[in-house]
Image (cartoon, rainbow, N blue to C red):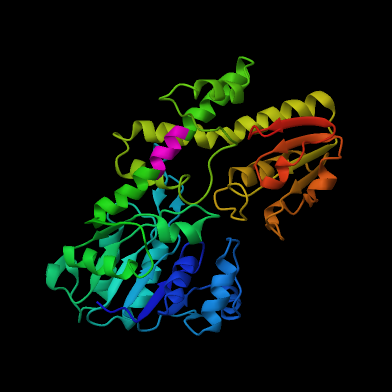
Amino acid sequence: MNFDTICVVGLGYIGLPTATMFASRRKKVIGVDVNQHAVDTINRGEIHIVEPELDIAVHAAVKEGYLRATTRPEPADAFLVAVPTPFKKGADAGNIPTPDLSYIQAAADSIAPVLKKGDLVILESTSPVGATEQMAAWLAEARSDLSFPQHSGEESDIRVAHCPERVLPGHVMHELIENDRIIGGMTTKCAEASRDLYRTFVRGECLLTTARTAEMAKLTENAFRDVNIAFANELSVICDKVDIDVWELIRLANRHPRVNILQPGPGVGGHCIAVDPWFIVSETPEEARLIKTAREVNDLKPSRVLEKVRSLVKGHDVKDLVFYGVSFKADIDDLRESPALGIVVKALDEWSKDINVYIVEPNATDLPGIVSAAEKVAFEDAVKKDACHVLLVDHKEFKRKKPDCGFIVDTRGIW
């Protein structure tokens, strides 16, 4: 199939790099986002997120006329949906969060009017099992004049597939090209058409499967990581209670040829690992007991960090409290589901009236309003303060030196 024009709905941390990759291969790309600021920024050849090498690629793609952003989808040969898939707080007896597919539904409603026979629609958003079929159902409801895979199988007018991203923030531009892609079609022809599209820039292997298997594969990858992080985080809590250096313990245990324990931290953040396991648990709560427990262990870790800080504040008459990092991982500006940000918000609620609270975050020019009661300071100034220093994110800047005086709570093991 020829894909001369590609429409990417959602120009965030995945959608914009993906759109730019196609544009770099001289495909005409229409990027769509509801955020007018993002649209205007991209059309100037600039970016509204932090991702190495992306700014240069976007500038070139816009300047050469291959990438254009707008707020409404336009006719194209392929449509990629890369919108958020958050969860709703649990309302059942088990308090299990459930998937929120409203952004996917809104995206489907927006592209339905411009679909034509022969088009390909791919859901890239990480989604619960069955979300691709649900998107296809919404599209079919809006366009009864076209046939879809759930009714017409291989002979459908519209091809529908799921292809989850598998990239690491900070390395997206490289990994989009080099990583293998799982491509799940609602039919074989849907999968094959999607493979043809991604081969435009993907050097990794394109692995064909069903849409449901592709959805579950992405959830499984992140649940696996979440369970392993939970083991490290639980170890850190145990070691703190029995007065053992968890960093030394893990270093020694990992000398075993078949042991590879991850590093503990203040919790788990980001849109993937902190969210995706709940999609599995919400569908199979009785069976996903280990996955559910891991989520609970990681969700509880920020409270453990606050307990540690609280003991120092109360026991040593601390007047200055400095938090290092509020993003969900090192060397990026992404705050989605950030445990570090949550810790700072709760600390401000508890101490901002009596203690000076400072934030060091080199990757963000502006901080969200929920932490406006804290003062943003430079790293060089922060480490000189006689304060309680709380390291939450291991940004490369923080590895240069440790604070000169005061108390340290190091959740990343770099000081």
Q: In the rendered view, would you say 63 is above or below 310?
A: below
Asked whether 370 or 170 is in front, the reply is: 170
* Residue appearing at x 86%, y 40% in the figure: 384
In the image as oriented, which residue stretches furthest toward the top? 242
- Relative to residue 269, is residue 141 drawn left or right? left
The majority secondary structure of the magenta stretch comes to helix
Residue 228 is situated, as x and y percent measured from the top left of the image, at 44, 33
* Residue 98 shown in magenta: no
Residue 27 image offset from top left, x and y in percent:
40, 79
Is 79 situated above or below 324? below
Name the image quarter holding residue 285.
Answer: top left
Q: How many marks?
A: 0
Asked if residue 102 shows in the view, the reply is yes
Quarter of the figure that contains the N terminus: bottom left
Q: Quadrant of residue 135?
A: bottom left
Which of the two residues, 147 or 205, is positioned nearer the viewer here?
205
Q: Residues in magenta?
A: 222-228
* In-image side of 235 versus 28 (left or right): right
